[in-house]
Amino acid sequence: MTPTGRTIVPVSWALYDFGNTIFSFAVVSGAIGLYLVKDAQFGERDGNVLLSIAVVVSVGLNALVSPVLGAISDRGGRRLPFLLFFTAVCVATTFLIANVPAIIGLVLFTIANFAYQAALIYYDATLKTVSTPAARGRLSGIGTAIGYCGTVFVGLIIFLLDVPVEDRFRLTAFLFGAFAIPIFLFVREPTPRGPRLTARDVVESLGQLRQSIAHARLVPGLGRFLVGRFFYSDAVNTVIVVMSVVAVKALGMSESDANLMLLSLTFVAIGMSFAWGWLCDRYGPKRTLVVVLASWAVGLVLGGVALGLGSAGLPPFLMAGAILGSGLGGVQVADRVLMVRLSPPDRLGEFFGLYGLVGKGSQVVGQLLYGATIFLLIDAVGTGAYQVAVLSLLVTMLIGLWLVWPVRDDWAGSGETRTRPGAEAARAPAAVPPSARQSG
């Protein structure tokens, strides 16, 4: 599955997913929300609002600079040095969150989440380096599944050792740092062609956003896919952040039981990640993504209804969680493969910057919508505010599904196309003339 034929290369790449998913689960989906809503910190109402603000600021700033970060890596021809820098920042700031006053810890989380999101731009782009086109979906699926094994690993540690919320930050920092090391030791990028990255290249990249949008419009279907990703990522990213708080506050679960529930649902995501990867290679990333998004719509409806049933809603809530967990793996597997399939090789980092921008921009919108809903309704309707907030995400999910539906994943300009049985691959030159543009 890898151009080098060395097993250690894809294993090292996947272990990074193992490490960064530990951060996503233990900190973003768990510790930070539970930490902030404690009465000793900011309380339920203000803690939810401050969590949303921290996510909005960290992800919003990252969205603005994502195209710049991606373009800079294209000019230098390297991804790993940037990945190393942002990983180190994330690890260092996460370690300190609970060692300082809560308001400073909130600032440190904002920096850590910014660095985590920035690192993903470069990590996703390295998929092309470590895989062959024929096996890209399977390797993406394996990486996602191994990433979820990181969730199981840290979840079991937290559950079995009953790790307090405050100690989870230091635990996460240590584990993320340890499992990130192999990718920097064993993955080797091709020698960059052309001149080395200079300060002038960095300055010129600051005006990249308008150019990146213009370049994306020349690629058939890419613009429509990115807009669609903005809408469906709204639901995906928001659910990742608020799942623990919703389980504890709306369903009355203990922090330990909520962790165990999320851990159990992770096993579903692990198994389905392999299945989504196989479907991606067999039927194409676009078809796979459409099925995933449809399943998410069902899960959001079921979850919203379950939250209105009080303690009796736990069984349908768990069923909804299993559907959403499965779909979460599917989104990660399919949409980054689709992004590689649509991107010309010489603009991969640039377009992954746009890919990051729309995903993070949607998270800003999702967190603002969620935080405002909880803030405005929690005093009036109690836990019903969580039900309204979850169901509001269904609308953006359906819009994203509608936008992605007509996108084709067999554009030949990326050099990734293999003609599917019974279908003729679309042909287009690497530089698509204006007359060949599609809507969006």
Image (cartoon, grey):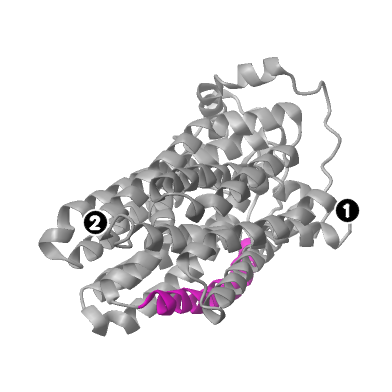
- Identity of the amino acid at label 1? Thr
Q: Estimate how packed mark 2 is, as few (under 14), some (14 to 19) or many (20 or more) residues with alpha carbons within 10 Å.
A: some
- Residue 345 is at least partly visible in this image: yes
| Helix, strand or loop under label 2 | helix
The residue positioned 32% from the left and 81% from the top of the image is 314
Q: In the rendered image of this protein, does residue 38 appear above or below residue 305?
A: above
Q: Position of residue 90 (x, y in %)?
A: 59, 47
* Residue sitting nearer the eye, 160 or 277: 160
- Residue 430 is at least partly visible in this image: no
Q: Which residue is mark 2?
A: 45
Q: Estimate how packed mark 1 is, as few (under 14), some (14 to 19) or many (20 or more) residues with alpha carbons within 10 Å.
A: some
Q: Position of residue 310 (x, y in %)?
A: 22, 78
Badge count:
2
Q: Position of residue 102 (x, y in %)?
A: 40, 50
* Residue sitting nearer the eye, 335 or 67: 67
The circle on residue 348 is: none
Query: Could you say which quadrant of the image residue 33 lies in?
Result: bottom left
Going by the picture, which residue comes out furthest to the top?
A: 200
The residue positioned 43% from the left and 57% from the top of the image is 32
- Identity of the amino acid at label 2? Arg
The residue positioned 73% from the left and 47% from the top of the image is 128
Q: Which residue is mark 1?
A: 4
307 relative position to 112: left or right: left
377 relative position to 303: left or right: left
Q: Position of residue 159 (x, y in %)?
A: 52, 78
45 relative position to 11: left or right: left
Q: Which residues are magenta?
A: 254-280
Q: Quadrant of the N terminus?
A: bottom right
